[in-house]
Image (spheres, rainbow, N blue to C red):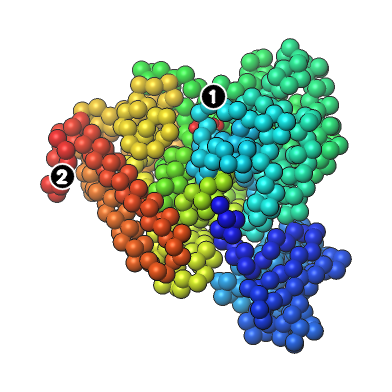
Amino acid sequence: MNVQDHMWLDPAVLRPLTRTDVYALDLRGGEDRRSIRLRGEILELTGGRLASGVGDDGGVRPNVVLAAGGCGLADDDAFRMSRADGVLRIEGNTSLALLYGFYAYLRDLVLGRVVREGDGRTESPSHPMRMIDHWDQIDGTVERGYGGASIFFGIPGENDNGSYEHERPWNHADPFRNDLGRLTWYARLLASVGVNGIVLNNVNVRGGARRLIVEPYLDKVAELADLFDGFGIAVYLSVHFAAPISVGGLSSADPCDPDVRAWWMHTAKAIYERIPQFGGFLVKADSEGEPGPHEYGRTQADGANMLAEALRPYGGRVVWRAFVYDCHLDWRDRTRDRAVGAYETFQPLDGAFADNVCLQIKFGPVDFQTCEPANPLLHSLRATNIVVEFQIAAEYLGHQIDVNFAPAQWIDVMGQPVDGGSDGVPLSRSLRARALDPANVGYAGVANVGMGAHWTGGVFAQASLYGFGRMCWDAGLSAEHIADEWAALTFPGAGRNAQGKIAAILKSSNRTYRDYTAPLGVGWMFAREDHYGPSVCAFEYDRWGGVNRADRDGVGVDRTSTGSGLTEQYPSALRDLYADPARCPDELLLFFHWVPYGHVLHGGKTVVQHIYDTHFAGVERVREYVAAWDGLRGVIDGPRFENVAERLRMQLDNAVAWRDQINTFFHRMSGVPDERGREIYP
Ligand code: GCU
């Protein structure tokens, strides 16, 4: 594929500009040719009229100046942008801050925003950690990857469709893809929205990937770390908790065993000697079959703190996942539920983690579902560094085929007050105050890019990556604002009318997908293996715990004190809200309660009629997307037009399949006819 097939930064506007290097800046060639030069910490954009109509003095005096140091900003990533005497000045404490400021300036240019003479603004990131987690594997496949093969690993030309089910042959001598050009473009894209950390490999650290933390692979990791460092992005690796055994040849991985501790200390030292800017380790322990400290009768804090001790001398972090739950549930037992697992394991350990450990918590208590409340741990922890985990890859959200702008859901969940009441600080802004070290909190998103077309398979899937970066940077942005930005930046030549139509599709897309897949928060009615397409009871009698508990009388999962007790894990205001079916928000009703089909929702409809209506409405909205997009034929360039058109057709097929299976299932179960007499299959 062509790397010019970019996302939101027009490659004609900016060649890769790192915070340390000098690159020529071509503004579409010809008369508009400009250049950037590095002079110490001062970058000057020379050549005259770049920002519309100001500062043009024939190229003698710069009209944009980037100046480091002495501007009094508290945050080293923050920048100030102001205009005086016709010169736009971007200031920050560090070259990275200038880079962020410069990207913001470019965004302003395309969006037509102008900093007027005498005006200025300061931007400072909401979250210090802005991470992308790749689930890439060294055979070139990507677990839950829908954008093609890994951009980091694999043999060029092979495995380009990606898959995660089985290990494929890989090149032991050099498992890296070595496409540094493409990675430079990628680093630039991420930096342009403020991402500052990246994990190269999957949390399930399989086979040879366990050895990435030792020679001979450190040289290659160092090469990538250098490349990403140029854009202010620290490289991390996922590690296998049992690496002392699988890599080190020891007989144990017990975190209290001195030999095990010494092995990690030695391993960390060797990494940092080679890669001084290394970010740290990401760990999935005691989860879905991965090894962990529980195997030795130790706590999660024992395991994490052991690694923290090894990384501490070098300033490294341990990002420790809270995705610990029982995946051997018995569907007959209604008191057990995967949703309660993280809180049960980690709440008692609040305050027990070292200050360079970040607890990475999935935003919801289950698993990146289309409709979930916030994870109760996000409300309850008071002395722990929290990194909230989102999945940009659309495993449960339509595989980057169905358009689904997930930031709408994420921003909504993280907007909830931390105390669950009406006037607390939103979760999104509460992390620093509850941290052991406020520098060690933030957001992580599971990546959705690969070697496939348009980086993300579907063009619209780029918007979720863009939106993730933007919501990390500025917790105050609305999903609507971000969707507007993405449409305008990605299709700059299409005109406002077209951009508005594109943004409108994005804005309603998350709701639309939810409407035809997860009525009232019940969820888990998708195909068992790949999680795409309907299969109503695929998880119903299964050990993974995704149930809907539908019978002839009603539907939903009792997660109150008479069921699994999840409601009891929330602060009192939310517990009281969620535990009462009369008060519980409609969209979460079936997530928390089993209710009869005739239960009347706040909007006045019965549950079963709501299910019918939303499934019909979801399909209709997809039809509207198809028509709206078709109206842009000739306005959007061919490859991107066809990509979206094809995916929308696939989405329509998918939505129809969902509608018919779900509606038929609930009609058969309940025996209640649709009050509008629409076609439901007997
Ligand atoms: C989901 C996903 C797995 C992944 C896991 C995780 O369950 O299906 O592929 O490994 O999440 O987040 O660790």
Q: Quick one: label 2 or label 1, which is nearer the N terminus?
A: 1
Q: CB of residue at label 1: within 8 Å of ligand 1?
A: yes
Numbered circle sitting on residue 565: none
- Confirm or deny contact between disc 2 and disc 1 (CB under 8 A): no
The residue closer to the viewer here, 325 or 36, is 36
At x 52%, y 63%, the residue is 490
Q: Which residue is tagged 2?
A: 679
> Compared to 464, does 293 lie above or below?
above
Q: Quadrant of residue 81?
A: bottom right
Q: Position of residue 305 (x, y in %)?
A: 74, 28
Foreground of the two, 64 or 434 = 64
At label 1, the amino acid type is Glu
Quick check: 483 left or right of 321? left
Q: Which secondary structure lies at badge 1?
A: loop
Q: Is residue 78 left or right of residue 484?
A: right
Of all residues, the one furthest to the bottom in this rendering is: 57
Across and down, in percent, residue 107 comes to: 61, 67
Q: Find the distance from the CA under tag 2 to the CA under tag 1.
A: 41 Å
Q: Give whichever of 596, 168 is nearer the camera.
A: 168
* Residue 172 can be seen, yes or no: yes
Residue at mark 1? 288
Q: Residue furthest front?
A: 157
